[in-house]
Amino acid sequence: MEDQDPDQKTEQPTEKRLSEAMESGDFAKSHELTVMFPIAAVLGVLALTGHTAARAVADYSVTMFTRFAVTTVERETVVMQLGEAMATFGGIITPVLVSVILAVLLANGLQSGFRLSPKAAAVKFENLSIVAGFARVFSKSVFARGGIDILKLIAIAVALWLGAKELIYDPLFSAPVEAAYLGHFLNSATILFLTRLLLALGIVAAISYGYEKFKKSREQMMSRQEIKDERKQGEGDMQTKAAMRRMARRLMQKQMLSAVATADVVVTNPTHFAVALKYERGVDQAPVILAKGENRFAQRIKAIAAENGVPTVENKPVARMLFALGKVGTTIPSELYQAVAEILAVVYRTHRYYFHRLKTRRIGEPSKP
């Protein structure tokens, strides 16, 4: 049995590939869905507000025609009439416009998963290529899209024909009716046509979106080699981040070790933990942790403390709690104030010569920003 070609796209796309495709706007989109949702929104608004809107138009018409005999044509009256017309028809059109805008946003949001695609708006110069343009014109997707467009025209034609066939028997075309019936007929006809058109577009949109979904899933398939390359790239990024974390940790350890020489005391476990503390009256509100470490790093802290004559006090529970709860560069936890104060009091009494030298050493330190 022959080995499978590693460049053959037989594997499902990874989450990273799908996320990149979504950011670039390369996901299943159906234009029919974008058309269907606004039509559904208009149909809903007409069904809810159609009678109210028709009554508003009728009242406005009665008022306007009644005033014709007594209204003089002047600038003020014309402005007033225009204002009333805009208020009347604006109140009718505004719900329709708002519903259409919301429907378009909803249609696009459902297809994109309500995620932004910033790369989709970028200019792609390869789309300006004549060769690429001919390739797109004669591609399979163009023929498939043409077939869907033809199906859409047939569906719309059938929906309109069925609606017209039903409305042609309305009394409006065969008997005298009241003028008010015309508004009722227009409202009923509009809702009837939109309903049939919505059903027809719904079928076409389902076919179109299914095809787009299938096409994108095939285009986004990956080869085994691409998955291996992506995994290596991810591992390389992880190694880089790990190296940066190690570098930051070494830098922090170096800073801690350099600060041990100016500590007031080093509290030890004695072998597992070591914590260097500093307290300057009038400067620090409470003792500050200059450095802390465990095992081998604790031994390095103790060695530097011994080289610089820093007092070392063995107190297992205090050292353990300082290491577990304290943070380098901050004051000790409040629950350890009493215990650390007792340690410092003993150190101040027994190592007076060291603190005389420490004061001089701290004066010689460069000021910190």
Image (cartoon, grey):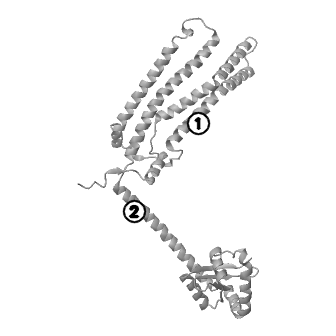
Q: Amino acid at mark 1?
A: Leu
Which residue is painted at 51% across and 27% down in the image?
Answer: 198
Q: Residue 275 at x, y = what percent?
A: 63, 81
Secondary structure of the residue carrying numbered label 2: helix
Task: Tell me the residue at 41%/24% (across/down).
Answer: 154
Can residue 126 be seen by looking at this rendering? Answer: yes
Which labelled disc corresponds to residue 311? none
Extreme-front residue of the structure: 317
> In the figure, 210 relative to 344: above or below?
above
Which x, y percent locates residue 152? Answer: 43, 28
Query: Quadrant location of residue 186?
Result: top right
Residue pictured at 54% horizontal, 21% vertical: 192
Mark 1 Cα-neighbour bin, 10 Å: few <14, some 14–19, many ≥20? few
**Of the numbered discs in the image, which one, if any, rests on residue 232?**
2
Q: Is residue 113 left or right of residue 152?
A: right
- Circle 1 sits on which residue? 102
Residue nearest the observer in this picture, 118 or 224: 224
